[in-house]
Image (spheres, helix red, strand yellow):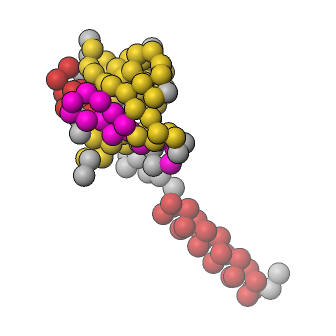
Amino acid sequence: MNARQVLVSAIRTLSLCALLALVAPSSAAEKEHWRSVKGAVLQTLFQDREFGDGIHFAYYLKADGTFTGTEMTKQVSGSWRVKKSEFCWKWQRPPGPEECYQVQQDGVQVRLLVNGSEAWYGRLKKMP
């Protein structure tokens, strides 16, 4: 390798390192802050909000305790409520039993848990 090739190789390596430093998540900046949500706060958290992942599902949770939406392009509907500090929903379309979850929130991100294990993950948005 001549001096020019060594210099070009060094510049490429430094450029790649700089790029990786920009796109690599910072452990301090990307730290998650999940907190449990219960009671009256849980009721207002979902009321008049869209809960979705941006691709696979979007549910519109109305203040009257009903929800509608789509799941993999299929129409869904049902009812929701807060019961013993858990978020519960009962599917009418397609029919299904009532399912209840513990709820954790980190900003607009929400996860629904069963026995401490994540069952659903999505974001909340104010309904238009």
Quarter of the image holding residue 98? top left
Task: Give whichever of 72, 105 is nearer the camera.
Answer: 72
The reply to whether residue 35 is visible in this rendering is no
- Find residue 72 and report its horizontal and vertical position in percent: 54, 42
Query: In the visual, does 108 lie left or right of 18?
Result: left
Seen from this angle, which residue lies furthest top?
A: 84
Q: Is residue 61 magenta?
A: yes
> Over which residues does the magenta segment extend?
55-68
Task: Give whichever of 31, 66 is nearer the camera.
Answer: 66
Quarter of the image holding residue 116? top left
- Find residue 41 and report its horizontal and vertical position in percent: 19, 27
- Find residue 110 and report its horizontal and vertical position in percent: 36, 35
Is residue 5 depicted above or below 28 in this figure?
A: below
The reply to whether residue 38 is visible in this rendering is yes
Q: Is residue 54 magenta?
A: no
Residue under the point 20% across and 20% down: 39
Residue under the point 33% across and 25% down: 79
Task: Give whichever of 13, 75 is nearer the camera.
Answer: 75
- Find residue 7 and report its horizontal and vertical position in percent: 68, 82
Query: In the visual, does 112 lie left or right of 84?
Result: right
Query: In the visual, does 104 lie left or right of 43?
Result: right
Task: Give whichever of 38, 68 is nearer the camera.
Answer: 68
Quarter of the image holding residue 86? top left
Residue under the point 44% across and 35% down: 76
Image quarter of the N terminus:
bottom right
Residue under the point 63% across and 78% down: 11
Seen from this angle, which residue lies furthest right?
A: 1
Callout count: 0
